[in-house]
Image (spheres, rainbow, N blue to C red):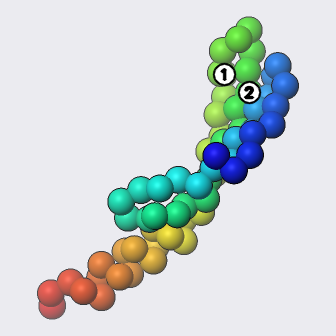
Amino acid sequence: MVAAFGDERTALLMYDAETIPAKSAPAAECVTVRDGKIVYNRFIFDRLPFEEFRRRQAAHAPR
């Protein structure tokens, strides 16, 4: 977790996702809450670490 902010209606979470293809992939979520339930979630992530992984895989693939 990098940061988290919010109130009773909106929350913003920023974190660094660690996955098999990307050891570090910054991501953020903005959620809208109504009556104590999440009614909307917007997810944003940096695709560059995944693209770099794909390029490395393609460079080492048999031809």
Which residue does the numbered mark 1 point to in the structure image? 39
Which residue does the numbered mark 2 point to in the structure image? 32
Q: Is residue 49 above or below residue 57?
A: above
Quadrant for residue 22, please give it.
bottom left
- Relative to 51, 59 lies left or right: left
Residue pictured at 71% horizontal, 11% vertical: 36
What label sits on residue 24 in the rendered view? none
Q: Amino acid at mark 2?
A: Thr
Which element is circle 1 on?
strand
Q: Which of the marked residues, 2 or 1, is nearer the chain's N terminus?
A: 2
Quadrant for residue 8, please give it.
top right
Q: Is residue 45 above or below residue 55?
A: above
Which element is circle 2 on?
strand
Q: Position of residue 17 (x, y in %)?
A: 53, 53
Residue pictured at 30% horizontal, 88% vertical: 59
- Relative to 59, 39 lies left or right: right
Q: Residue furthest left?
A: 62
Q: Amino acid at mark 1?
A: Val
Using the image as rendered, state which of residue 40 and residue 27 is in the foreground: 27
Q: CA distance from mark 2 to mark 1?
A: 6 Å
| Pointers 2 and 1 in contact (C-beta within 8 Å) | yes
Q: Position of residue 51 (x, y in %)?
A: 46, 73
Q: Is residue 38 above or below residue 48?
A: above
Quadrant for residue 63, please give it.
bottom left
Q: Is residue 29 visible?
A: yes
Using the image as rendered, state which of residue 13 and residue 63 is in the foreground: 13
Q: Position of residue 5 (x, y in %)?
A: 80, 37
- Relative to 55, 6 lies left or right: right
